[in-house]
Image (tube, helix red, strand yellow):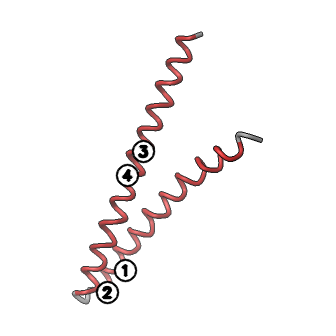
Amino acid sequence: MARCRTMQDETDASRSNDRTQTEDALRYIAEMAAQLASLAGETRLPMLTYFLNMARVEAEMQIHERVAPTVFARTTRGR
């Protein structure tokens, strides 16, 4: 039984690591897209500004979708 628990712990740790890497990548993408959108706006490239802002918004939405279920699960476990 201890071995099964250890395997489960390793699986959980791996998923947590994957989730952290994905969230870090999404934050980086959102930040870079925002900076590039700003640059595109300053140089009067409206369509490029629009698409870069859409990329930023999508990355931010993905972050919130991934974080919200985790937070919700933590708050409802105690009930």
Who's the residue at 22% across and 87% down the image?
Answer: 43
Marks 3,4: beta carbons within 8 A:
yes
3D distance between C-alphas at marks 1 and 3: 28 Å
Dividing the image into 4 quarters, which one contains the C terminus? top right
> Which residue is pictured at 58% across the width and 47% down the height?
70
For marks 1 and 4, the one nearer the N-term is 4
Labels 3 and 2: the sequence-earlier one: 3
- Mark in front: 1 vs 3: 3
* Of the image marks 4 and 2, the number of the one nearer the N terminus: 4
Distance from the alpha carbon under mark 1 to that under mark 4: 23 Å
| Residue 16 image offset from top left, x and y in percent | 47, 38
Q: Which one is closest to the eye, mark 4 or mark 2?
A: 4
Of 48 and 15, which appears nearest the observer?
15
Q: Residues within 10 Å of mark 4 (few under 14, many from 20)?
A: few
Question: Where residue 20 is drawn, which disc sits there?
Answer: 3
* Numbered badge on residue 24: 4
The three-letter code of the residue at mark 4 reads: Asp
Q: Residue type at mark 2: give it.
A: Pro
- The answer to whether marks 1 and 4 mark residues whose Cβ atoms lie closer than 8 Å is no
Q: CA distance from mark 3 to mark 4?
A: 6 Å
CA gap, disc 3 and disc 2: 33 Å
The residue under label 1 is 50
For badge 3, the amino acid type reads: Thr
Residue annotated with mark 2: 46
Q: Is residue 23 above or below residue 36?
A: above
Q: Is residue 50 above or below residue 25?
A: below
